[in-house]
Amino acid sequence: MSLFSDVAPIRFEGADSTNDLAFRVYDKDRMVLGKRMADWLRLTVCYWHSFNWPGNDIFGAGTLPRPWLGDRVTQAMAEQKADAAFDFLSRLGVPYFAFHDVDAMASADTLEEHGANLKRIEAVIAEKMAKTKLKLLWGTANLFSHPRYAGGAATSPDPDVFAFAAAQVRYILEVTNRLGGENYVLWGGREGYDTLLNTDIKGELDRYGRFLSMVVEHKHKIGFKGTILIEPKPFEPTKHQYDRDVAVVYAFLQRYGLEKEVRVNIEVNHATLAGLDFEHEIAAALAYGIFGSIDMNRGDPRNGWDTDQFPNNAQEMTPAMLLFLQSGGFTTGGFNFDAKLRRQSVDPNDLYIAHIAGIDTLARALLAAETIVNEKRLAKVQQDRYAGWSGAFGKKILSGEYNLSSLADHAVKTNLDPKPKSGKQELCESIIASSCKF
Ligand code: XLS
Ligand code: NI
Ligand code: NI
C-alpha cells in the first residue's frame, strides 16, 4: 500500500470515456506506421518532480502530501519513496523511469557515505525493477542543489568542486550501468555564469570539455552501452547556461571532439525559453545527427521561466512529432515527463490525471503525425518546393561542376530571371490543424 494505491491500473477506454482515470487515446498496442504506440513513445516518469518535490516555491513551503520527504532523508524514507514511486509507475502502466542520485537515496554528509547510501537504494530499486519489469531510461547526478555547486560543477572556479562532481558522476554512472539504464544525462545545472565580470568563459568551457571527456572515457571503461546526453537550456538557474540550445551544444561537442559520443536530450520548455520552437530543436538535432531523447513539458507563454507544466496541446506538439516520426523515432531515448503538478494539486489522483493527460496529448500528436505522413500532402509541398535541386542543373551545381565565376557566367548567358513561387505556408498550417482530430 502506498499513497498511490487507491487507483486501479490505468486502462485505455477510448475517446468516449468519461473516466478521469483512463486513457482516451493512448492505446499501447495500437500500431502506428508499423510500430506499437508504446514503442514509439517509450514513456517515462521522472522521480524528481513526481516523488521528490514537495510543492514548494520561492514564496512558500511544500503543499503536496509526500510523507517520505524531510530535511534529512533516512534510508527508511528513501525506501518508502521507492515503494510509492514503483506503485505509481506500475499503475500508470509506463515502461520507464528516470532519476537523479539524490532524488532516490538517503541524505549523506560525505562522499563515502554518498556512495554507500546510493548503493543501498540501488539494491532496493534493482529488486523493484526485477519485480515490476520497469526499466531505467536514464540516470543523472544532481550537481546543482548543494551550496558547494553555487559556482558550477565542471565549470566551478574550484578544482575541489570539479573533483567532487567527478566522484558523484562516477557513482551514478556506474549505478545507471548496473541497473541497465539506456542513457546517462548531463543537464548543465549551474554550468554557466551570473556575471561576466568574474568569469573566464574560455577556461570554464575548456574544463567543461575536459569533464565531459572524462565521463565519456569512463563510460567506455565500464562498458556502459547507453547514450550520453546533454540537455540544453538557455538560462535558469544561471543568467547564461553554456548549453544554451542544440546548435550551441553541437559547437561545444565538436570543439572538444565529442560530437560522435554525445547526443542531446531536448526539453520543450527549455527550447521555448531559448526563444526557439520545440520543433526547431528537434529539427536541429536531427540535422546535426545528435538527436537523443526528449524531456516533455510546456511553459506558460506569459511566464519567462521553466514552469514545467504537463503538455496538453496536441496541435502544438504535432510539427515536432512529425519530424520525430519521419526520422524513425528513438534509438535509446524516450519521452520523459519532466513536468510537475501545480502547488494546489494536492490529491494523490492529480499525479495520475496529469500524466494521463500528458500521455494522451502525445498519443494524439502521434496519430496526427501518422495521418500527415500517410496523406503525403505536406511531403508534396516540400518536394515541389525543392524540386529544382533534384533536376539536372541543381545536381550539377552541387557536384562541383561549376565554380563561382562559371556559374555566374551561366546565369548571365542564359539570362536567368527566376520568379517567386508560393511557399504554401498557410496550406502547411492547415494540414497540421486538420490532422488533429483525435
Ligand atoms: C531542469 C532540467 C532537469 C534535468 C535533469 O531544468 O530539466 O530536470 O532534466 O537534471
Ligand atoms: Ni529536463
Ligand atoms: Ni527543465
Image (cartoon, rainbow, N blue to C red):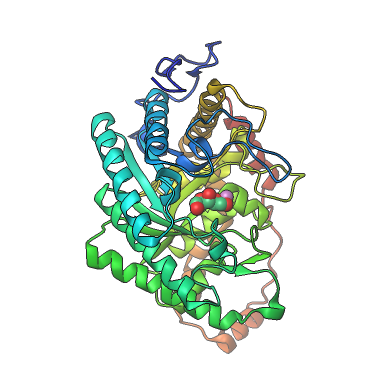
Q: Quadrant of residue 87?
A: top left
The residue under the point 34% across, 49% down is 117
Q: How many marks?
A: 0
As drawn, the residue found furthest toward the bottom would be 405
Residue 385: x percent and y percent? 58, 55
Q: Is residue 336 visible?
A: no
User: Where in the figure is residue 232, as x and y percent of width and height?
Assistant: 54, 59
Residue at 49 percent of width and 60 percent of height: 143
The reply, left or right, for residue 216 in relation to residue 81 is left
**In the rendered image, which quarter contains the C terminus?**
top right
Q: Residue at x 39, y 18 (%)?
A: 9
Outermost residue, right direction? 302
Looking at this view, is 266 or 284 the one in front? 266
Q: Which quarter of the figure has residue 35?
A: top left
Kindly tell me whether residue 121 is visible in this rendering.
yes
Residue 36's place in the image compared with 147, above or below, is above
Image height of 289 relative to 378, above or below: below
Residue 89 image point, x, y percent: 40, 30
The front one of 185 and 107 is 107
Instruction: Locate residue 427, reporting x and y percent.
Output: 66, 41
Query: Which sits in the foreground, 71 or 160?
Result: 71
Q: Quadrant of the N terminus?
A: top left
In the depicted structure, whether residue 313 falls above or below residue 214: above
